[in-house]
Amino acid sequence: MTLNGKEDTLTVKWAVWIGILVILFGSLFAGWQSNNSRITRLETNLEYTVRGIDELKTSQGKIAAVLDEIRFDQRRRQAKEKD
């Protein structure tokens, strides 16, 4: 501590500036981390949705093939009954 007190006020000012910078960068890092986790969750949900749509299309194709076989069998039976 000096007699005139200028060194103490200078030290306090630097401590305040360093504290403000730490708080600023800390809040920016927290926001970045939050956005990063949201983006990761969104990508995961999108991947799950796309995979589900692909599976749904595959299932629809299989169902359409089975329906075609059923219709063919029904036409064959009707033709057989007419004879």
Image (cartoon, grey):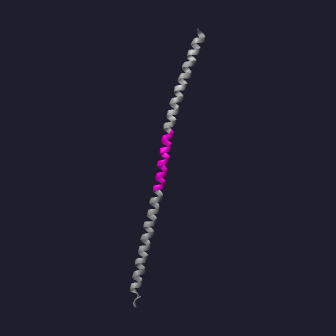
Question: In the rendered image of this protein, does residue 4 appear above or below residue 53?
Answer: below
From the viewer's perspective, tell me whether residue 72 is left or right of residue 9.
right
Residue 21 in the image: x percent, y percent? 42, 70
Residue 9, image quadrant: bottom left
Residue range in magenta is 36-52
Image quarter hosting the C terminus: top right
Q: Residue at x 50, y 47 (%)?
A: 45
Residue 61 x/y as whole percent: 50, 30
Residue at 45% from the left image edge and 56% from the top image edge:
36
Q: Residue furthest bottom?
A: 3
Magenta span: helix, strand or loop, mainly?
A: helix
Query: Which residue sits at x=53%, y=23%?
Result: 68
* Place of residue 70 in the rendered image (x, y in percent of width and height, measured from the top left): 56, 22
Q: Position of residue 20 (x, y in %)?
A: 43, 72
Q: Say whether residue 76 is magenta.
A: no
As displayed, is residue 20 above or below residue 1?
above
Q: Quadrant of the N terminus?
A: bottom left
**As displayed, is residue 35 above or below residue 66?**
below
- Which residue in the rendered view is the most extreme toward the right? 81
Which residue is more in the foreground, 4 or 45? 45
Residue for point 51% across, 40% down: 52
Q: Nearer the viewer, residue 27 or 59?
A: 59
